[in-house]
Every structure is written in C-alpha cells, then in structure tokens.
Amino acid sequence: MDNFFSFASLAQITEYKATNGIIYHLNDTVKLGRGTAPNGEFLYVEERGIPSPGHTRFLPKEFTNGGVIIKKINTHKRSGLLKYDLVVSAGGLFNFSLYIDDAIMACEVVPCGHAAAKPVGSVADELKKLKDLLDSGALTQAEYDMQKKKLLSQ
C-alpha cells in the first residue's frame, strides 16, 4: 500500500540537486554509468507502468555509458522520507522512472557516490556525445539543439 499512496502523492518540480552535487533540470541529459543487475540492466531505471511481453522491466545494459533525458521530476514520501524520481526518456516509446539518489549510490548514474560534480571533458567532447545520442535516436533534434545551446553558452 505504501507504493500506491506514494504514487498518488507525487508532486512535479522543475529541478533537483542530487546527492552527487549535480542540479538536474527538465530536459537535461543524465549520464549513465553501468547497470548493477547481474545481466547488466539498470536496477534503478525501471519501465513505467505494467511491463508488457517482450519489453524489459529495467533499462537494458546497452545504455551503459549513455544518457537519458529528463521529462519530469517527481517527489513523494515513502516510509516518512522524501524521495525523488525522474521520468526519463531513453529514446524509445516507453519512459522510465529513474530513482536518482539510489542510482547515484549504485553508480548507475555518474558522477556517483557523494562526490562533487567534476567537469567530464571539453565542450567539444560533450558536443560529440550529444551528436552520438542524436544519431542513435536517444535525443530528438529539439532536445539536441537545446542541450547544444546550453553547452555553448557555458
């Protein structure tokens, strides 16, 4: 019953400062590390809704070192604690719930742990990653343009 009530009390917000020191906003790309399930799936990135036959319940290992786009940021109380989950798109038909702080602690999201955010690479490196996500279908042209504009304005 706790899950039902926590789902019913979801509230949407537009940004969240996670335990890794990163402030996540709507339409940002969350950088993934590796899945922690024995088969490489991401245990803290779960398909929303009831999984249908032929679809995975968790984000597949093919997204290792990739990224997902934040569509919504939700907050709810579970066992008296305030929790955050991000509704993310991996470029397919289905959205996923990313349990952000749990994923950070498990290093399914990078940077992970309690480390402060560090620059990952040059703007050119980041643009190349965005272009790869666009080419793979993980980003739409509009999402790519928005993220590119953010990078170039830094």
Image (spheres, rainbow, N blue to C red):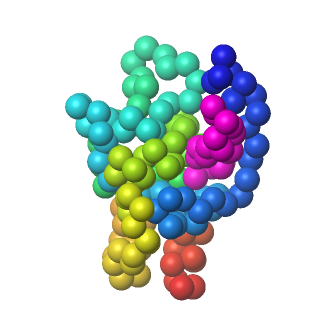
Question: What residue span does the magenta drawing correspond to?
Answer: 70-86
- The answer to which image quadrant residue 67 occupies is bottom left
Please check the rendered image and state whether residue 42 is part of the magenta-colored stretch, yes or no.
no
**Depicted 100 relative to depicted 115: above or below:** above
**Depicted 9 relative to depicted 138: above or below:** above
Q: Is residue 8 visible?
A: yes
**Depicted 45 relative to depicted 150: above or below:** above
- Pick the residue in front: 132 or 80: 80
The quadrant in which the C terminus is found is bottom right
Measuring from the top left, give residue 45's x and y in whole percent: 45, 39
Residue drawn 31% across the image and 42% down it: 35
**Depicted 28 relative to depicted 38: above or below:** below
Left or right of 112 on screen, residue 144: right
- The answer to which image quadrant residue 132 occupies is bottom left
Magenta-drawn stretch, dominant element (helix, strand or loop): strand
Q: Is residue 93 visible?
A: no
The quadrant in which the N terminus is found is top right
Measuring from the top left, give residue 21's x and y in whole percent: 50, 67
